[in-house]
Amino acid sequence: MEQLQNDNFLVEVDRHGAQINHIYNRHGHFDYIWNNDLWPKHAPVLFPAIGRSNEDAYTYGGKRYDMPQHGFVSEYDFDVVESSDTKLTLRLAANAETRKLYPFDFTLSITFTLGEAGLSLSFAVGNEGDKPLSYSLGSHPAFNVPVAGEGSFEDYTLTFSPSQSKLRQFEIVKTPNPYRDGKLKEVEGFDGELPLRYRHFDDGLIIIENEGIDKVTLSSPKTSHSVSLTLSDFRYLTLWTKEGADAPFLCIEPFNGLPDVTGDLVDIMHKEGNILLDPGKTKTSSYDILLS
């Protein structure tokens, strides 16, 4: 386990999957990150797929390849490239096993930088091969709600900056796994802010089209603590909590990529929401977790 620390926070990151396990508030003596067997993950990294692919597979060059839900990097140990009290860079490179699922020579480097206001994450995808590659990238942090145990889940709201007159989400089809049907609809219950209601998650997740949202903030009048994520580098924002469980956590997930529309296998080079990267190029996407 790798650690970052300053006067305000203690962060633990697992090299296995490059997952944040804890962000501990040293003054308030509480953890922002979810840790409970009800959902045994904390903040998985999603690459090179997000959500479900039809038949858990895709095509490339006329050949079928298997693709697990949310990709495969959460199952691999990353190498430590740089480590200090306030900065950590982890790296995963393509290998013989990954090429069976994803026939591209990639590198994925993730840098965690701890500051006085919170944690910054930077994801650099490199194309080390001689052909264009296509990928999705997402971050899936789960935050304890209520924050610091203050209030209850439905005492909290999400606000957006700049303020939004409406939010649009993708309609979800459960088969029983969640896929999209290709349509968009307005987010239920949104009136300038989005109150957290368990019933909003009956379909399992809310994928919001980011039409100019720079930041989302989780807060409640029951506490002085809050969690904000910056979103400028990400096209979609997904919200999720375990459906039917009244679970005391919320995943706030910056996404570049989407689950499939239910139907036939998709050619990865034409997959909606994916990023295309030319040989020799690197694409970096970053966001901040701002904490109070």
Image (spheres, helix red, strand yellow):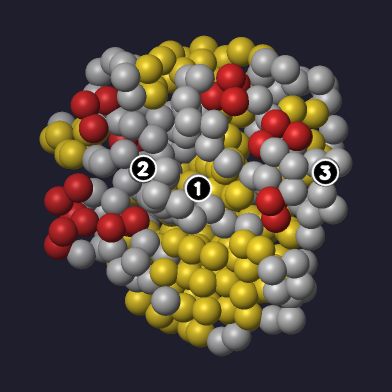
Q: Quadrant of residue 130?
A: bottom left
Asked whether the viewer can see residue 91, the reply is no
Q: Earlier in the sequence, mark 1 or mark 2?
A: 2
Residue 200 percent location from the top left of the image = 60, 21
Residue at the location (64% across, 44% down)? Answer: 145
Q: What's the mark number on residue 140?
A: 1
Q: Is residue 231 left or right of residue 279?
A: right
Residue at the location (58% across, 41% down)? Answer: 248
Q: 126 above or below 87?
A: above
Residue 228 percent location from the top left of the image = 73, 50
Gap between marks 3 and 2 measured at Cα: 34 Å
Q: Quadrant of residue 253?
A: top right
Q: Dot 3: what SS?
A: loop
Quadrant containing the N terminus in the rendered view: bottom left
Q: Earlier in the sequence, mark 3 or mark 1?
A: 1
Q: Is residue 78 left or right of residue 125?
A: left
> Looking at the image, how many numbered discs can be counted on the residues?
3
Q: Dot 1: what SS?
A: loop
Instruction: Return the residue at label 2.
Output: 70
Name the amino acid, label 2: His
Q: Quadrant of residue 214?
A: top right
Quadrant containing the C terminus in the rendered view: bottom right
Gap between marks 3 and 1 measured at Cα: 25 Å
Asked whether the viewer can see residue 198, the reply is yes
Residue at the location (15% across, 34% down)? Answer: 64
Instruction: Return the residue at label 3.
Output: 222
Name the amino acid, label 3: Lys
